[in-house]
Amino acid sequence: MLSLYANQIMAPLKNSRGAAAVMVAVTLTVLLAMGAAAIDIGHALVARNELQNAADAAALAGARALGIAYEGMTPDQMANYTLTGGDQAAIVAAAQATSALNQAAAVSVSVNAADVQIGLWNSATRTFTPTANQPRSVRVVTHRDGSANGPISTFLANVVGMSSVNVSAAATAELAAIGSTPLGALDLPVAISELFFSQFGCGDSIQLYPSNGTPQSCAGFTTFLQTPSNDMAMRTIINGMIDGSYQVPPTTAGVTHIEFTNGTLSNPTWNALTNLFILRSAGTGYWDALVPVYQGGDCSPSGAIPIVGYANIRITNVQGPPNHLITGNVSCPLFQGGGVGGGPSFGVFTTLPGLVE
């Protein structure tokens, strides 16, 4: 009787031990799965960062190859450029060679040719559009999956049936609007107002002098960094440009302030300016001049005004006394070697790329 009573008391405890064993087994499985996930997810994240580094480097290399292609062109060729098979091959090869110098999870990162795209980047919508017409951007996608380099093997996730993971990364590099100019890049002592670009742009005509107060004729004579800014200083600069003894100092959009004369030029200075045009336009009849774009809408600028960007003006007519006239049109896109990107876009771009995605 006592034995029967004891068995009745111990029965629930025996059942509890069985339930506890099941709970321990389940808990251990869950913990093991969580541990496996933590290790393998961490490994995949490290691999993705490595893929991102490879994509960044490859996009920059591809965009630099595009910039080199532009450096060998005239302004007219730049404005009418359509991507050639040879240039595309060079861009793809540069991206692939650079990517292969990187590893993701101990595997050299190869890039499929189809994963190198050439086109335009829209900074407002943050979208990339492939195009062969005046492209400025290169986008590269790197993979560790079935399409390239193989998926990443897991360490412990096999426990839950996951033997590998797919990882990819993308980067876009762009030949951005030029944000600075090196020594001697600016070669016309005239700057135009950003007001022009509120209504006009590439291909539109502009009257640099005389100003009539409208956006299409809003500019001023500048002695760049030299003070005082007056007629004599202007003539000295122009004559120095003619004989090669003067080069405009480096400038940076948003930082450099340039000096304006706010006055008419004397006949000797106009004659010097006419001679400079004759020198620069020899053989073509026009002069492609890189000029600063200044802040604000003052069409009779004076004193120091900050530069906000740069534009390319094709000067087609310079008349000295008695007409005193300078006309041309805005010619773009233009790709300027040696400058650094980062300024607002007025149609002039650097050939040195930067990452945008």
Image (spheres, rainbow, N blue to C red):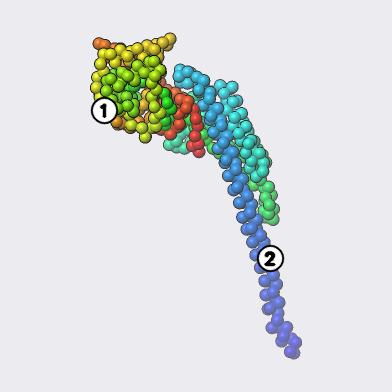
Which residue does the image show at 30% across and 22% down from the upper left? 233
Q: Which residue is mark 2?
A: 25
Q: Which residue is mark 1?
A: 302
Q: Left or right: where does residue 54 sit relative to residue 24?
A: left
Q: Residue furthest top?
A: 283
Q: Nearer the viewer, residue 187 or 58?
A: 187
Which residue does the image show at 75% across and 87% down from the upper left? 3
Position of the N terminus, as image quadrant, is bottom right
Q: Residue furthest front?
A: 245
* Residue 130: image tag: none
Q: Residues within 10 Å of mark 2 (few under 14, many from 20)?
A: few
Which residue does the image show at 46% across and 34% down from the upper left? 122
Residue at disc 2, secondary structure: helix
Q: Is residue 216 visible?
A: no
Q: Position of residue 269 (x, y in %)?
A: 29, 16
Q: Left or right: where does residue 303 sit relative to residue 183?
A: left
Q: Left or right: where does residue 134 sit relative to residue 140?
A: left
Give the residue type at disc 2: Ala
Q: Nearer the viewer, residue 331 or 266?
A: 266
Mark 1 or mark 2, which has the lower sequence index? Answer: 2
Q: Nearer the viewer, residue 241 or 17?
A: 241
Give the residue type at disc 1: Ser
Which residue does the image show at 68% across and 54% down from the upper left? 156
Q: Position of residue 120 (x, y in %)?
A: 49, 30
The residues tagged by marks 1 and 2 sit, at their Cα atoms, a distance apart of 83 Å
Q: Residues within 10 Å of mark 1 (few under 14, many from 20)?
A: some
Q: Position of residue 228 (x, y in %)?
A: 28, 26
Quarter-of-image position of residue 16: bottom right
